[in-house]
Amino acid sequence: MFDSLSDRLNDVFKKFTGHGKLDETTVQAGLREVRLALLEADVNFKVVKDFTDRLRDRCLGQDVLKSLTPGQQVIKIVHDELVELLGGASVDLELRGAPAVMMMVGLQGSGKTTSTAKIALKLRKRKFKPYLVPADVYRPAAIDQLQTLARQIDMPCFASTTEMNPVDIAAQAVEAAREAGCNVVILDTAGRLHIDEPLMQELVDIKAAVAPTEILFVADAMTGQDAVTVAETFDKALGVTGVVLTKMDGDARGGAALSIKSVTGKPIKFVGMGEKLSEMDTFHPDRVAGRILGMGDVLTLIEKAQSSIDQEDADKLAKKMAKAEFDLEDFRTQMRRLKKLGSMESLLKLIPGMGALRKKMGDAAVPEKEMTRVEAMINSMTMQERHDPDVINASRKKRIAAGSGVTVQDLNQLLKNFDGMRKMMQQMMGGGKGTKKKKRFGLPGMGGGMPGGMPGMGGMPGMPGMGGLPGGMPGMGGMPGMDGEDGEGGARRGSSGSKTRKPRPKRVKNKKDKRKKRKK
């Protein structure tokens, strides 16, 4: 979402870091670029003015001007100010009462119903017992949508009907939740325009009937500054306690996220990062600021991994890898877990320094299609073949290749690479006690590489010594310019990436040379 803003700010920082010392002229020129970058990102102009004024005061301070590395000091100042602009620190929900009541409000189509189910799922992971309440009696199938989502996540849901009054639905649902032993009630109200006075009054009546401790305004991040204006109106009528930004994974410029706290004074509490019900994240201003400045977000990456990978399964897998018992079934399981974390592109953005590298690598940085192709080949195998690839003979290869829509050569490459990766893992995890036949196992593009690297992915530009991305991806063709082996015939590939044949014997030019050769 912040890609364009991040690129512009990084260009500004390059100009700062190129100077041994900073003077007022350099700072003013840099701040002008920052101002333009923020305005292009659709940030409120008053917010931009206040932000750049604070930057100017701090950048022209004595601490920066006398610093040995003024460029780095400026980056730190911009980071700190961005954190403050985004809210300073993450703000948790205030859930008081038995049960606590939350209201979801906002415009039509902003994503309230889906966000209701997503937040309920997050609360259940925190040991709460949510109770979903569809209170939108105006939009066709709105009640059915929330009830369907509730069944998907196995969550209790109030049996609303379109004939009921929304205020009565809210009051009855609170009593039903109390009887069911639930401690959080989430009301999904109807979307409405902020200028529709009768519908806004309906929200005021619901608030008076159930006294919610949280009123969350759900805003579509794609709407930019308009979301801020609408949030102000809802806040005046209801007293909004927080904001939920949806569609943060889109290509919006980020103006709403950067403006809404400064203009409304209300913190952003959640951000929707995708369509899946699990893709709702707590908003951390410091982490978002780090992403904007290209510093990555390792903590979010760790949290994603912890939430999707079971520790016991990980320990079992580590033991299998150490004993070289890691099979294709285990590998397919790992690929599926990796997909649960999100797309490869979104994961690379969370790793410090990988944002710029991802752009240099182009399509090679996002091997989604190759992962799908490898999984298709494994899916076409029987369970015996997955556990013991050695049983796969020529006829089986033809069957598997036909079933997965690839060539036998592709399958041979997968099997060859997987065997090499398994031996390498045994050697690395066993302290070098692996096979002694080869020091390199013919992993295309690996060039030695790191344990767990992606065979065939090749080393990444500007990162010497790295054999590929973590996770192990046999079956993915080597990148041009990297040495390796072809999966089918074992022919070597040169630096150009094309196959090279074995040198032919020197041709004998005449009969005299032939006679000399026979005598020898």
Image (tube, helix red, strand yellow):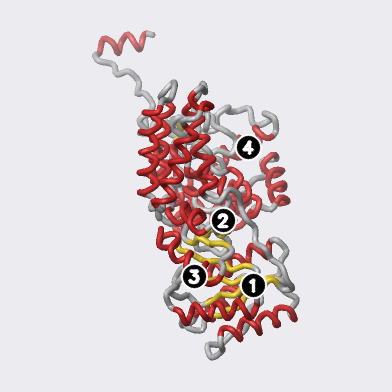
Nearer to us of marks 1 and 4 is 1
Rendered position, 167 above or below 9: below
Residue contact between numbered discs 2 and 4, judged by CB atoms under 8 Å: no
Q: Where residue 106 is drawn, which disc sits there?
A: 3
Q: Which residue is mark 2?
A: 340
Which sits earlier in the primary sequence, circle 2 or circle 3?
3
Real-space Cα separation, disc 2 to disc 4, in angstroms? 24 Å
Nearer to us of marks 2 and 4 is 2
Real-space Cα separation, disc 3 to disc 1, in angstroms? 16 Å
Q: Is residue 489 visible?
A: no
Real-space Cα separation, disc 1 to disc 2, in angstroms? 34 Å
Q: Is residue 53 visible?
A: yes
Residue contact between numbered discs 2 and 3, judged by CB atoms under 8 Å: no
Q: Residues within 10 Å of mark 4 (few under 14, many from 20)?
A: many
Which sits earlier in the primary sequence, circle 2 or circle 4?
2
Nearer to us of marks 2 and 3 is 3
Real-space Cα separation, disc 1 to disc 4, in angstroms? 55 Å
Q: Amino acid at mark 2?
A: Lys
Q: Where residue 212 is drawn, which disc sits there?
A: 1
Which sits earlier in the primary sequence, circle 4 or circle 3?
3
Which sits earlier in the primary sequence, circle 3 or circle 1?
3
Residue at the outermost left position: 510
Considering the numbered disc 3 on the image, is that residue within a helix, a strand or a loop?
A: strand
Q: Amino acid at mark 4?
A: Met
Q: Residue at x 37, y 44 (%)?
A: 37
Q: Amino acid at mark 3?
A: Gly
Q: Which residue is mark 4?
A: 425
Q: Residues within 10 Å of mark 3 (few under 14, many from 20)?
A: many
Q: Amino acid at mark 1?
A: Pro
Horizontal and vertical percent position of residue 436? 63, 27
